[in-house]
Image (cartoon, rainbow, N blue to C red):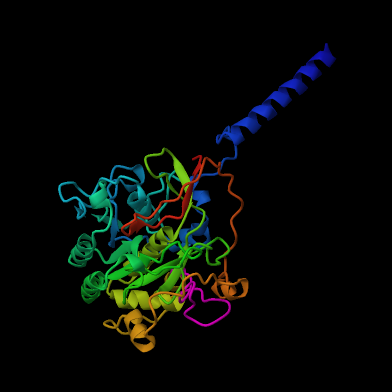
Amino acid sequence: MEATVTLACKKWRVVVSLLASMLVVGGAMAPSAAAETMRQRQWYLDRMQAERVWKVSTGRGITVAVLDGGVNASVPELKGKVLKGRNFAEPKKDAHQDPDGHGTAMAMLIAGNGMNDQGIKGLAPDTRILPLAVAGTTKESGTRNVRAFADAIRYAADSDARILNISMGYEFYTLESDERDQIQRAVDYAISRGKLLFAASGNNATDGNEATYPAASTGVAGIGAVDDTFTVAKFSTYGPQVALAAAGDEIPIRCLDGKPGYCRSGGTSQATAVTSASAALIWAKHPSWTGNQVLRVMIQTAAKPSEGKVPSRYIGYGTVRPRINLLDGKGDPGAADVNPLVKANEANDPSPSAPKGSEPSASSKSEAAAPAGPGDKESSGIPWIIGGSAVVVAAAVGLFVILRRKRGITS
């Protein structure tokens, strides 16, 4: 009898083992007793010492304008944080409709409440979001509409928002010179109104490395993406338009295109949201500063490239580290009325686009490896379940949402 029971147990263990294997292959997994929370999957929050930073600043009092496809105000992480906003792509609709979920995902990275560690925690959780929809649901409204885009920038400039998060852009070749000028005039107006603009540099480093606008517009901080080793991500578009970099790889977000649950993702879109949140933390601590002063301190306190000249073509002046100002008190705000990027542009007059097809070599890419600061340690492995992959393709006429890839994960 004892032998029979032992044999039966062995058979049961085999069945369980096979079942578990089938579940993994099929994109599902039985929950484990030690399953990680969503907060633990946000590795960059630990690397940026967010818990310590939040004791000093949570972004309270700062509004971030999110220029995207809209922001869904009903998701749990954003309850009570999203203002009315405006839809410039489809004026008859409001800005709380977000067809593909991209704008909502970016807003959550900035201001998400974390839902007791079960949802996405924003780096600046007490900021407010002003949704400005610049990409609609139809073919006409969802593609290129430079006027609507420029109008949204001007609207944000006249609003209470201090920071403009632009996790999207137009590739250089899709714009006429007068359209680039139209964007630049809107950017100039926003800067004159004291706003701080961050825009994704793009995800085409290995496919043409075309500069995008407004990231390449004078006065806008183009943002590159780094991975969890703080080395530039392979996809991150590089060139003189890159001013700063932030975490943009293996970032958990709410799944796009109506898919349930949370997904891992990568792109300069995500890096831009992390940068905007970093600025909100600093500005909330120093509310009397201007956008120029906040940006100058972010540049000064960024983790500089370990090799090569600064600014680097890959991570600009370095990887954002708001804790250096908030916890260590470092950074000289300097002149209130001088945009450090405009001044640098006037001095150097850089070309807006890096040479096409010039993939960085292994040696040249080393200049983008930022040194880890005190307390910056790598996170432990995250057992996310692969459920597929996708790439958001640029519309033929030019407007595209910058999101590298996404994979399903369990929450």
Q: Percent x, y for residue 358?
A: 52, 72
Say which residue appears at 41% left-offset and 48% top-offset: 114
Say which residue appears at 42% left-offset and 44% top-offset: 255
Q: Percent x, y for residue 245?
A: 46, 68
Say which residue appears at 25% left-offset and 56% top-offset: 134
The answer to whether 97 is drawn above or below residue 127 in the figure is above
The answer to whether 378 is drawn above or below residue 346 in the figure is above
Q: In this view, which residue lies farthest toward the top?
A: 1
Say which residue appears at 23% left-offset and 51% top-offset: 140
Say whether residue 321 is magenta.
yes
| Residue span colored magenta | 302-323
Say whether residue 381 is magenta.
no
Indicate left or right for 360 with 14 as reference. left
The main secondary structure of the magenta stretch is loop
The answer to whether 107 is drawn above or below residue 176 in the figure is above
**Pick the front one: 372 or 106:** 106
Indicate left or right for 166 with 409 as reference. left
The image quadrant of residue 288 is bottom left
